[in-house]
Image (cartoon, coloured by chain):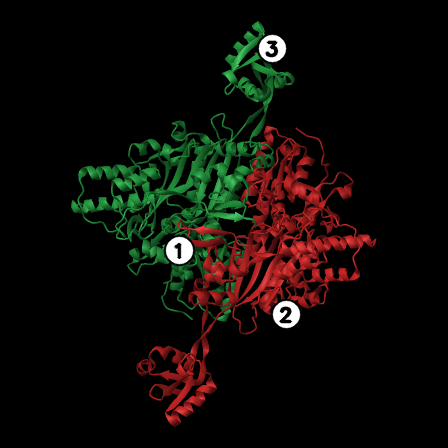
Chain colours: A green, B red
């Protein structure tokens, strides 16, 4: 499959070649493949596992350690009540519809989108225009960021010319495909007569399908539970304990790295849409007053980001702007400093792990995309062969979660802040003589009290005056006989009072950067992949140019011969690298040096250490750099020091080449035994 | 609760004080506590999370990196068919029984055990003997290793004297409590009239309760799935790919670190029996021929282990022997070198993270405890206030798992090994002329062929002779009319042939060391906890003496004052420690220095760095060691170097004290602002 996506070197991306490499080298593999596999589930093999661990390690240092975040590890199993309160039980759903004949199941929005796009392609063909790449492969179509189409049977478009009005209607529909609810999607299926190519039938009306995996906790089957769809809730539920652990100091952030689960209706996009995935989430708790400033914002202010704001999108455009984050916050494009700070930090993180800087943008959610409680939300999207893929979300969740959980449980999920200057409050206050009030109103006492305490200040002022003047007033009480209650001055006193508060209570707002590690990992693979063949003219040879920080293995040790005298040298090098904390592997197979290096170029191993016959004589070894395939030669100690400094990022390959003598050798394709 | 357990300093363990500390410092906390909690689920707070990460990090270096194991990360979600084949669907169950009145649910073996122990305690009391600690707290009772009793209501034993014969019957029952199946447990409940103290009724007969959490994968509800109960199966299913990744080289090991799930009937022992837990599992694949030697066995041969073998246990004793692993393998106590190698490596790992060396033993499974396919199995047990707790299992699973999955799926989960010397095979072989054979036997052809090819060598020799002599023979074929088939020499040739095989095929055996990280973590907390109060005479102050390798935070930075001029020094120290890869925390609260150090003694932080007024003058800082509370003073650079060398294990506190001048200061209990 050729897409508009490109490799690291700007070559057209041969996705099939890349996927074949990733499977061959066991970066990842479909789970349970010998049992036929289960869609949306993948296992990571050794290089994928190491890559994932390295990305997580950089993440932990970049976010948790750098900012003293409080890491927690909460359970995946979550009882019903928690996710009912958070809104997931009612709202965490996609619309699905079913073919009435063959029972095939579609995600309704994907179905509508795919059939309409198919017809539009057929129309272009009939008009003799070159059909555009399918939207899936169109990097400028921002609608593709969250979805990957089903491979509908009979996908090839028929060349049927459509009326201009129909084309317009289809395009208008596609432009707001994320906006429709189930009923509307059902109406579109009817209106446009959208049929499953496999059966020729319209699917049944869409029904909501909750994406959470359910299970029963405990032996009695009484406790309904779910596998969490995000790691956030555990952090919110522990808020009070975390605040105490942080010695009541605000703002602070918690963070969590763990698996989450979503029972996707029809996952078919490799690592980009899976049912079990690793997330890294930060919940930064901030005082909602004072404009959500961030004390380290000045450190990132000059960071330039590519921003696609909601106004641009609503105007039907997808051309982003490049701005410093300082400017974006000053101009109100990004809601506040704390949100802006994290957008910049996310950008720096993606840069650090080696994401292609020309393939990142930050897209703001449109009003209808955001949860109703969210103040602002941006996605970091990475450009891949599946279009722009949402890899990091960064939302201002306001005080929503803490508020609903506090309300449901009565737990004080709030901050009590001692005020330096006590706050003086002057107001009308009501005092009730409970001893008389109860007997007077009997069963209505509660309703009368609620009505009285619910009155606004001006009403209380009026009542106070009336009560003082006449000794009796009447107030409206819903549900009471006659709708009114008579109050007398022996029951109630209403006075102008003055008091000072030393403590302010507030529910923090939450800024939530949320990372899909699997999506980042896959994008990184595409961004760092290229093919050596195009340059040299030989058979295409894949290379993945991982930065040393994330490369699964940093150094390959290659003895040129399997003779016994090489073994102690290889073992020593291995042990010395381990002592330096550098992950290395030995390849003492009988394959040629060239083949062995090729294999490790595919694995993304940045450096190769060759032990040859010269080593036996003078102890020198050669060091090869993956991307240039150039080599230097020096003593073992010098080379080990060079490796350490390269991996720590203290020197570049150019620096090393400038210092150490070059070594010229062909990567011969014959086995040397 | 006082138990026979002791602290690191040999003091009686005050478990309540320890648990209060662990909660106060947020090592872990019941999940969903504000919703009332769910038993068997715990969240790790920041120190618990860091401790867990550090244990895993040591584990990864000690096992995976040291031995080039192939790490994989497989999914938790597992389809029915896989776990049906592995035997988990049918056999991964406990027996549970229910109170007919209040619906209370018990694990049947725990119920029987608890009531009998209660009666025995009552008997001792009636006889005027000091009742023994309950088995739960008796470190010499090896039956407690896997269970923690339910807190039955009305637990206090009534002082009722039993007949001597009854006492004997109870004791005999308890000695083999792990042996009974559900029916037998039900019979014991009837026989001994065991009643739930809460209702005075016998529970209903035990039923099998499968411990796996079930769920549905996909929207159609058609695919039954489970949350994996162990990480092993994903490794087995990927065996062929891993072998290829390892370039067909044997032996090798895969390893996995991830969550597993068991729906425990009634979990009530804190971190020791939970429903969601982190496991680290190794599957070492080894050739079953040649005695399962291990090429690095000589490196660990002299390691001394405390072994409680099955013969000792069957003789009713619990006194272990201390042997070198070399001796144990030579004597046949441990089945083979590979198993022995891993037992020693497990021991070294536990030592490395700081497990109390006097509280480790290796207990061999008795024949009836092991799975039928296991060749040998040992548990590393750690002594805690709940008795001996199984923390690591190390089993020889033979070729069971690979065999059943290969048989079910047809996947070649085996090793093809090129033989250096081809193996010459001489034997009687059958050749069938298919063209004539089919038409001759029609629908019975397959049955006749199967019968013929199933014949043993001597039978073939006889047939060959007869065929040559008479040109016709008859063989038994079950299901055929008359039970016999006539074979003629035009259909079949039976000859003595000679051929050589260059490839040997075999299914590897698996040695599986399997670690329960949560249990190890909890045991480590108990083993490293002690109380300073007993020594100094002040109020008891808890200390957890983690080794620097696993301590959640390595260094606490304490500015003596919150004045502005201290801030840059603190920030610099913080950054320098981060650059050295040393996890540090700043405590610039207004609490006294003493209070701040106390808090960090509870968190197990090994070193404290104090910035005081002298620092402002000459840049010197003090370094405090947690266990001795002694301090040294030197320049920042010198102290940082000392910290690094202490944390790397290159020097001890004594070494540091010998080199750097002591600093004498009281840990004053007044706030200095």
Q: Residue furthest right?
A: B128
Q: Which mark is residue B329?
A: 2
Task: Return the chain for callout 1.
Answer: A
Image x and y of residue A636, in percent: 50, 59
The residue that label 3 is drawn on is A489
Q: Nearer the viewer, residue A286 or A167?
A: A167
Q: Quadrant of residue A306?
A: top left
Q: Residue furthest front?
A: A481
Q: Is residue B672 left or right of residue A329?
A: right
Q: Nearer the viewer, residue A626 or B330?
A: B330
Task: Return the chain for callout 2.
Answer: B
Q: Quadrant of residue A624?
A: bottom left
Callouts 1 and 2 close, C-beta under 8 Å:
no
Other-residue count near label 2 (Cα within 10 Å), few / some / many at <14 / 14–19 / ≥20: some
Q: Is residue A41 left or right of residue B193?
A: left
Q: Distance from label 3 to label 1 (Cα)?
A: 90 Å
Q: Is residue B7 visible?
A: yes
Please tell me how many numbered marks the rendered image carries: 3
Chain-order first, disc 3 or disc 1:
3
The image quadrant where one finds the C terminus of chain A is bottom left
Other-residue count near label 1 (Cα within 10 Å), few / some / many at <14 / 14–19 / ≥20: many
Q: Secondary structure at mark 1?
A: loop
Q: Distance from label 1 to label 2 (Cα)?
A: 46 Å
Image x and y of residue A285, in percent: 51, 33
Q: Nearer the viewer, residue A559 or A293?
A: A293
The residue that label 1 is drawn on is A626
Q: Nearer the viewer, mark 3 or mark 1?
A: 3
Mark 3 vs mark 1: tell me if same chain.
Answer: yes
Mark 1 vs mark 2: tell me if same chain.
Answer: no
Image x and y of residue B280, in percent: 55, 55
Q: Distance from label 3 to label 2 (Cα)?
A: 94 Å
């Amino acid at each position: 499959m050729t897409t508009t996506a490109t490799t690291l070197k700007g070559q057209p991306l041969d996705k099939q070649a890349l996927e074949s490499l990733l499977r061959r080298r066991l970066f990842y593999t479909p789970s349970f493949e010998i049992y036929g596999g289960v869609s949306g589930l993948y296992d990571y093999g050794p290089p994928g596992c190491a890559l994932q661990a390295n990305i997580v390690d950089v993440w932990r240092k970049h976010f948790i350690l750098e900012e003293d975040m409080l890491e927690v590890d909460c359970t995946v199993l979550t009882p019903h009540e928690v996710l009912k309160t958070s809104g997931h039980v009612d709202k965490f759903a996609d619309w699905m519809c079913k073919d009435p004949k063959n029972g095939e199941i579609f995600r309704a929005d994907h179905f509508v989108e795919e059939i309409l796009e198919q017809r539009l392609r057929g129309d272009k063909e009939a008009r003799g225009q070159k059909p555009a790449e399918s939207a899936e492969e169109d990097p400028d179509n921002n609608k593709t960021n969250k979805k990957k189409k089903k491979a509908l049977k009979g996908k090839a478009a028929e060349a049927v010319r459509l009326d201009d009005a129909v084309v317009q209607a289809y395009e208008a529909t596609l432009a707001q495909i994320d906006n429709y609810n189930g009923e509307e999607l059902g109406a579109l299926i009817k209106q446009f007569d959208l049929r499953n190519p496999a059966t020729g039938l319209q699917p049944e009306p869409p029904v909501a399908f909750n994406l959470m995996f359910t299970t029963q906790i405990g032996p009695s089957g009484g406790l309904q539970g779910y596998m969490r769809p995000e790691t956030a809730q555990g952090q919110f539920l522990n808020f009070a304990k975390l605040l105490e652990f942080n010695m009541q100091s605000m703002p602070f952030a918690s963070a969590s790295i763990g698996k989450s689960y979503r029972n996707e209706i029809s996952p078919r996009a490799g690592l980009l849409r899976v049912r079990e995935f690793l997330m890294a989430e930060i919940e930064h708790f901030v005082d909602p007053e004072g404009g959500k400033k961030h004390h380290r914002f000045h450190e990132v202010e000059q960071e330039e980001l590519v921003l696609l704001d909601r106004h641009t999108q609503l105007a039907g455009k997808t051309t982003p702007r490049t701005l410093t984050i300082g400017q974006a916050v000053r101009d109100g494009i990004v809601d506040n400093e704390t949100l802006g700070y994290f957008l910049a930090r996310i950008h720096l993180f993606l840069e650090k792990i080696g994401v292609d800087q020309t393939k990142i943008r930050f897209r703001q959610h449109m009003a209808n995309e955001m949860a109703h409680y969210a103040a602002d939300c941006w996605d970091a999207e990475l450009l891949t062969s599946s279009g722009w893929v949402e890899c990091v979300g960064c939302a201002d969740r306001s005080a929503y979660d803490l508020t609903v959980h506090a309300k449901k449980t009565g737990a004080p999920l709030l901050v009590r802040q001692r005020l330096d200057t006590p706050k003086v409050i002057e107001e009308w206050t009501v005092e009730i003589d409970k001893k008389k009030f109860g007997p007077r109103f009997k069963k209505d006492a509660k309703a009368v009290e609620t009505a009285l305490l619910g009155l606004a200040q001006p009403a209380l002022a009026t009542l106070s005056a009336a009560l003082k003047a006449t000794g009796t007033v009447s107030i409206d009480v819903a549900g009471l006989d006659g709708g009114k209650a008579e109050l007398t001055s022996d029951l109630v006193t209403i006075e102008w009072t003055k008091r000072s508060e030393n403590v302010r209570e507030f529910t923090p707002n939450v800024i939530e950067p949320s990372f899909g590690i699997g999506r980042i990992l896959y994008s990184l693979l595409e961004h760092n992949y290229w093919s050596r063949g195009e340059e040299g003219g030989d058979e295409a040879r894949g290379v993945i140019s991982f930065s040393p920080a994330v490369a699964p293995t940093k150094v390959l040790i290659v003895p040129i011969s399997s003779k016994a005298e090489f073994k102690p040298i290889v073992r020593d090098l291995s042990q010395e690298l381990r002592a330096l904390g550098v992950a290395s592997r030995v390849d003492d197979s009988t394959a040629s040096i060239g083949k062995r290096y090729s294999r490790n170029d595919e694995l993304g191993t940045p450096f190769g250490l060759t032990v040859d016959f010269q080593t036996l004589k003078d102890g020198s070894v050669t060091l090869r750099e993956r991307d240039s395939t150039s080599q230097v030669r020096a003593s073992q100690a010098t080379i080990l020091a060079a490796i350490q400094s390269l991996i720590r990022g203290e020197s570049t390959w150019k620096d090393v080449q400038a210092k150490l003598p070059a070594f010229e050798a062909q990567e011969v394709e014959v086995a040397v035994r």
